[in-house]
Amino acid sequence: MPSDFGDESGEKLFDWMLKVGQDASEAALLSSAERLKAAFRNARGEIASDDAGTESEQVAEWAKLRMAEFEALPEYASIKEIIDTKLSELKIEHDFFTDKKGKEFLLFRIEDAPDVSRTFEELEKATDIAFDKALEARGLTREQIREAEPLEERVASARKASKALDSAREIKHDIELAEVRTK
């Protein structure tokens, strides 16, 4: 099955979609996929807008990306494994850690920020592919999900998704520079 996606992380995304789909309705599957794509997209924006701004005797070598938006999704451990696998496949030095306040972060070298951003973009695209394959495995299409859901439920679902996106935007995606003193 990795050949269907091109790599192991694509297969894991597909497995994640199926697990979420087994635990919830197709509408929830669509909502979860859209939230995951938004989390990847938002994380990329935070990585791209990162500004070093270091003092002359301090050099920032590491950045950390807060994982709160990903943690809010179902099966976060699987998502974390997907990200870890993809970054490892690309030989991007990284680690996950939890700070004293219990917030989890992805730590990576500043010089790798463009590669991390591209990786998240690839995972966002792979999420769409995995979603369609998960629907196909259930014998459904996106249109069937939208048509099968009564209008009132679609409106409620759209409002809920909108609120979730607004909440996700409010979450501060802390990308911080880990300052390291030179000499």
Image (tube, rainbow, N blue to C red):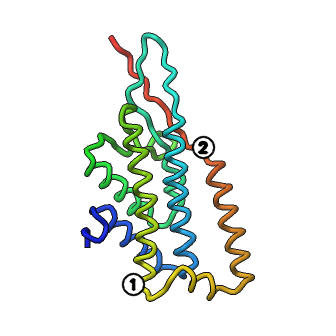
The amino acid on which the numbered mark 2 sits, given as a three-letter code, is: Lys
Of the image marks 2 and 1, the number of the one nearer the N terminus: 1
Q: From the image, which quarter does the C terminus lie in?
A: top left
Q: Please, is residue 93 above or below residue 75 in the view?
A: above
Q: Nearer the viewer, mark 2 or mark 1?
A: 1
- Between 126 and 85, the one nearer to me in the picture: 126
The residue that disc 2 covers is: 172
- Between 127 and 96, the one nearer to me in the picture: 127
SS under mark 1? helix
The amino acid on which the numbered mark 1 sits, given as a three-letter code, is: Ala
Q: Residues within 10 Å of mark 2 (few under 14, many from 20)?
A: some
Picture coordinates of residue 30, whole percent (x, y): 54, 73
* Residue found at x 55% / y 57%: 38
Q: For the residues marked 2 and 1, what is the alpha-carbon distance in whole angstroms?
A: 36 Å
Q: Residues within 10 Å of mark 1 (few under 14, many from 20)?
A: few
The answer to whether residue 139 is left or right of residue 87 is: right
Picture coordinates of residue 69, whole percent (x, y): 54, 54
The disc placed on residue 137 is 1
Picture coordinates of residue 35, whole percent (x, y): 55, 62
Picture coordinates of residue 80, whole percent (x, y): 39, 56
* Residue found at x 41% / y 70%: 130
Which quadrant would residue 76 be assigned to in this image? bottom left
Which quadrant would residue 152 be assigned to in this image? bottom right
SS under mark 2? loop
Q: From the image, which quarter does the N terminus lie in?
A: bottom left
Q: How many numbered marks appear?
A: 2
- Between 178 and 45, the one nearer to me in the picture: 45
The reply to whether discs 2 and 1 touch (Cβ–Cβ < 8 Å) is no
